[in-house]
């Protein structure tokens, strides 16, 4: 170990030769003055090949010291300085290969001379380990991404399956609700048919039996009274049957409707004439004015059915000596026919159910009726691009209005 005296050499050997780190000592002129066995092994030099050589011999070109001042800046710190690992430090072997290192610089003075002790750790293994860790991390990340993608697909498929199941459950629930509703309607229907047919048939049977007993000429008035009762009840049964048959017609294709031109007055006259036969004592049905010139293009039977239902309801749910008004007006491209009465009206809580099949308000439950008339009317009108609406105040009366398409100019052509 040149440039050190005997004592210095002994001290250096005691402190450095047994240390696993590579140690190189340089003077202020950056000349290597000493090195240990670990450094010789690390760089591939023999001791005599390093002593007296520039420190830059062990440093790659792009890291070489360019001035003594760089040495001074480390010496001035007067403490151990570890170069930052992120500086990607490399050292240069004798064979020209570089390897990653960690370097710590420790300036010191010995017998008045300044030196820089350089501690060198070969980071090749650690770098390889880091690279392996990075590779494994990358592989793991890729694997995680693949598994995440697969998991997302599984979740997506699961969500789709859940969605399908919910949809199926929803359809099943709707089907069950419809089945339940249908069963309830069947029960109501059977009960209704039983009640509605039983009463008229009882009257018909009773009147027919009594008529047979009145054989004398002076009994003619009584016979005619019972015959009239039979006629009324037969007409009532006929209306009920027409209502039930009309339910099926609503479900059929709209092409089954017979659209034709006819005078509105013909329908109104027929309906009002028949209604007067059913009216209560003192009830007056006011005929609409100025309808003789109105010709409509519609299904005459459906219009007659709808108007009959409204006027008959007005008669049924209005008291004696009351007035029923039938009004007609043309608004834009609609012909509006209104039937107003002074009857019992419809309570607010029942108004939202009034067009439901088989619905009957509590206030009229004691009166005859199928509860399907308004539902049938609404169904037919909607099939013919028409509508029905109403206004009602309980115990004061109701106004029901039918609106059908009307194009005067087209009819005139």
Image (spheres, grey):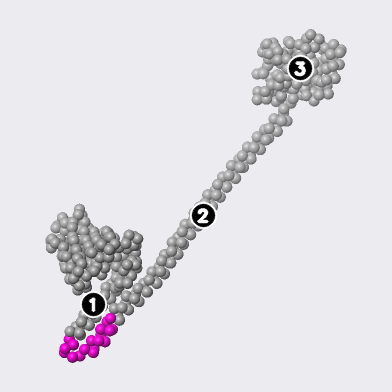
Predominant secondary structure in magenta?
helix
181 sits left or right of 89 in the view: left
> In this view of the protein, can residue 44 be seen by the observer?
no
Q: Is residue 72 above or below residue 275?
A: above
Mark 2 lies on a secondary structure that is helix
> Which type of secondary structure does the marked residue at label 3 adopt?
strand
| Label 3 vs 1, first from the N-terminus | 3
Counting residues from the start of the chain, the first of labels 1 and 2 encountered is 2
The answer to which quarter of the image holds residue 255 is: bottom left
Between the C-alphas of marks 1 and 2, the distance is 60 Å
Percent x, y of residue 288: 16, 63
The residue that mark 3 highlights is: 117
On the image, the x and y values in percent for residue 328 come to 18, 60
Question: What residue range appears in magenta?
Answer: 203-220
Q: Is residue 174 shown above or below 55? A: below
Q: Report the front residue among 186 and 33.
A: 186
User: Where is 335 relative to 274, above or below?
Assistant: above
Residue designated by label 2 = 162
Q: Which residue is mark 1?
A: 232
Depth check: 397 or 406 in front? 397
Depth check, front residue: 84 or 4: 84
Binning the other alpha carbons within 10 Å of mark 1 as few (below 14), some (14 to 19) or many (20 upward) gives some
Q: Position of residue 217 (x, y in %)?
A: 16, 89
Q: What residue is drawn where x is 18% and y is 87%?
A: 219
Relative depth, front residue between 44 and 408: 408
- From this viewpoint, which residue is outermost toward the top? 112
User: What distance separates the C-alpha of mark 2 from that of mark 3?
Assistant: 71 Å
């Amino acid at each position: 170990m040149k440039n050190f005296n005997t004592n210095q050499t002994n001290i250096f050997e005691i402190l450095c030769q047994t240390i696993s780190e590579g140690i190189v000592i340089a003077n202020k002129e950056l000349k290597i003055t000493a090195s240990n066995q670990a450094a010789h092994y690390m760089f591939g030099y023999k001791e005599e090949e390093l002593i007296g050589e520039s420190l830059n011999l062990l440093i790659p070109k792009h890291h070489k010291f360019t001035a003594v001042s760089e040495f001074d800046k480390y010496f001035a710190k007067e403490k151990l300085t570890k170069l930052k690992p992120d500086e990607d430090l490399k050292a240069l072997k004798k064979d020209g290969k570089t390897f990653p290192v960690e370097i710590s610089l420790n300036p010191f003075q010995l017998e008045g001379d300044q030196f820089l002790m350089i501690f060198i750790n070969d980071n090749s293994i650690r770098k390889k380990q880091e690279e392996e860790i990075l590779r494994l991390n990358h592989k793991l990340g890729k694997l995680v991404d693949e598994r995440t993608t697969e998991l997302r697909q599984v979740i997506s498929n699961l969500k789709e399956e859940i969605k399908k199941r919910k949809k199926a459950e929803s359809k099943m629930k709707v089907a069950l609700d419809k089945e339940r509703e249908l069963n309830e309607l069947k029960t109501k229907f059977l009960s209704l048919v039983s009640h509605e047919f039983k009463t008229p048939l009882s009257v018909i049977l009773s009147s027919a039996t009594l008529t047979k007993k009145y054989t004398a000429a002076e009994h003619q008035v009584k016979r005619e009274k019972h015959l009239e009762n039979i006629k009324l009840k037969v007409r009532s049964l006929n209306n009920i049957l027409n209502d039930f048959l009309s339910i099926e017609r609503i479900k059929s294709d709209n092409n089954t409707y017979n659209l034709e031109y006819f005078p509105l007055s013909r329908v109104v006259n027929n309906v009002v004439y028949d209604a007067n036969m059913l009216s209560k004592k003192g009830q007056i049905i006011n005929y609409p004015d100025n309808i003789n010139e109105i010709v409509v293009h519609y299904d005459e039977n459906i219009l007659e059915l709808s108007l009959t239902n409204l006027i008959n309801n007005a008669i049924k749910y209005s008291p004696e000596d009351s007035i029923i008004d039938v009004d007609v007006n043309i608004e834009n491209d609609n012909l509006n026919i209104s039937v107003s009465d002074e009857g019992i009206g419809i309570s607010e809580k029942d108004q939202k159910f009034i067009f439901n099949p088989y619905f009957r308000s509590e206030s009229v439950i004691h009166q005859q009726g199928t509860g399907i008339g308004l539902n049938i009317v609404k169904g037919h009108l909607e099939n013919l691009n028409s509508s029905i609406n109403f206004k009602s105040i309980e115990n004061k009366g109701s106004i029901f209005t039918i609106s059908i398409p009307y194009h005067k100019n087209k009819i005139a052509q």
